[in-house]
Amino acid sequence: MRGVLLIAFVALVSLPRTRAVWLGRLDPKQLLGSWYILAVASGEKGFALEKATKNIEGVVVTLTPENNLKMLSSRHRLERCDVNVVELLRQNSGWVFENPALGILDYRVLGTNFRDYAIVFTQLEFKDEAFSTVELYSRTELASQEAMSLFTRWSWGLGFLSQQQASLQRDFTCVHKVFQ
């Protein structure tokens, strides 16, 4: 895990032109609301083989009274929509969130224009597998060129190979389960 965080830090230092907006400086209210997840880069085992079958996901972000993030998400899994609610606990340092009991070790925004998109980094640990993801959150069904470019830059900068990156399939069936 330390190695992945070190790689993330080195990537951040080496991407000076990219607007990095750490959650410590981000008003979390700007992250609230409905988002489409349009692209993913993942180090998860098997992701490269399954990426062609992954569909666009939906996430609704709310803030609890304790300033934790509550995430309602829907994704397509095994011919059905899987709807989950996860609460991410605020860490002591700025607006960085986690829920180690669920395997979410780090959740933070890497870059955003505060209106249309956010690039989100997550460090995960499930069973014996530790991996990270970078996701492109968009307020609309299509991402802007700026958002796609920033997603690609962050993904490459954090060491994701092209086979570890995917633009998700334009199937909105499960997305609408959380946007209702």
Image (cartoon, rainbow, N blue to C red):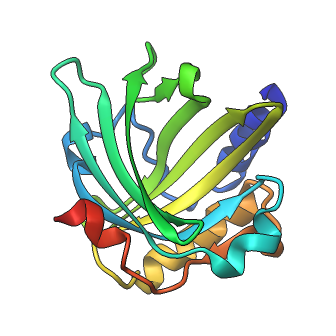
Q: Is residue 175 above or below residue 109?
A: below
- Going by the picture, which residue comes out furthest to the front? 79
Q: At x 73% / y 59%, what residue is drawn?
A: 157
Where on the picture, by quarter, is residue 77? bottom right
Front-most of 72 and 1? 72
Where on the picture, by quarter, is residue 93? top left
Position in image of residue 25 (x %, y %)? 34, 35
Q: Is residue 30 above or below residue 172?
A: above
Front-most of 69 and 30? 69
Position in image of residue 174 (x %, y %)? 38, 70
Position in image of residue 152 (x %, y %)? 63, 72
Q: At x 54% / y 72%, what residue is drawn?
A: 79
Residue 16, visible in the rendered structure: no
Q: At x 58% / y 43%, what residue is drawn?
A: 122
Number of numbered callouts drawn: 0
Front-most of 155 and 69? 69
Residue 128, visible in the rendered structure: yes
Position in image of residue 33 (x %, y %)? 20, 54
Instruction: Locate the C terminus and report the quarter of the image it occupies.
Output: bottom left
Q: At x 38% / y 21%, what residue is drawn?
A: 90
Instruction: Specify whether 81 is left or right of 141.
Output: right
Where on the picture, by quarter, is residue 7? top right
Instruction: Specify whether 105 is left or right of 144.
Output: right
Instruction: Locate the N terminus and report the quarter of the image it occupies.
Output: top right
Q: Is residue 171 above or below residue 55?
A: below
